[in-house]
Image: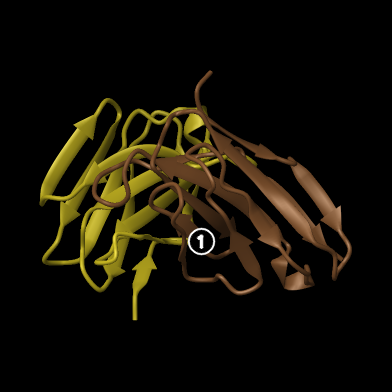
Chain colours: A brown, B yellow
Amino acid sequence: IAGITQAPTSQILAAGRRMTLRCTQDMRHNAMYWYRQDLGLGLRLIHYSNTAGTTGKGEVPDGYSVSRANTDDFPLTLASAVPSQTSVYFCASSELAGGQDTQYFGPGTRLTVL
Amino acid sequence: GQNIDQPTEMTATEGAIVQINCTYQTSGFNGLFWYQQHAGEAPTFLSYNVLDGLEEKGRFSSFLSRSKGYSYLLLKELQMKDSASYLCAVMGSNYQLIWGAGTKLIIKP
């Protein structure tokens, strides 16, 4: 079934550790996004990529990095995790960037930093 | 600043109609989206409005007034499976989505 996969499903991480959240889509979408979702807050954009080889910063990029080596994969790395990065992380993709293109979401990764 | 407001929680009865409101103040406007999110799951697309007026899609309809910075999602013939959070999001001038915190809809039998 076409869609977006994320791994891991959930993770408990010690503060200071490095962690990479994986995201893969098979819809050949150009644009991909990373969001975090915290209770009582809307989804917040961390980083995005309008096309393979390019990335941009969203609303809350500090402490996170991304790469977009190809169309399908968009990993999110936490270089040195802190407790405030405890959240649910969603990867999304859309055929094009902007406009009326619907964003499709992966199942999410629940991350706890202790 | 940019802001999207929607009620935190609403309760409705199975078979009834409910209207979920969303007001927004954003720098630029390139469309408004509604998504549904069941607990523990990913958001899924419901509707998109870019012009004023009502868009109907089965039991769900979405309305937009750009001059008032206002939208609503109307759900008819409510079913228990409609219990979920409903997220309003506006695409701003930079073509990034700005999200409301979501409205948790509780359906009672």
Q: Residue at x 29, y 66 (%)?
A: B94
Mark 1 falls within which chain?
A
Q: Nearer the viewer, residue B27 or A99?
A: A99
Q: Where, by quadrant of the figure, is residue B66 drawn?
A: bottom left
Q: Is residue A108 visible?
A: no
- Count the labels in the image: 1
Question: Horizontal and vertical percent for residue A100?
Answer: 25, 45
Q: Could you tell me residue B103's position as x and y percent?
A: 46, 54
Please provide percent x and percent y for residue B58: 27, 25
Residue A79 at x, y = what percent?
74, 66
> Going by the image, does B18 lie left or right of A60?
left
Q: Is residue A19 left or right of residue B17?
A: right
Say which amino acid is labelled 1: His
Quick check: can you spot residue A81?
Answer: yes
Residue under the image location 63 percent in, 66 percent down? A64
Q: Residue at x 62, y 49 (%)?
A: A75
Q: Which residue is mark 1?
A: A47
Q: Secondary structure at mark 1?
A: strand
Instruction: Determine the residue located farthest toward the bottom in the rendered image.
Output: B1
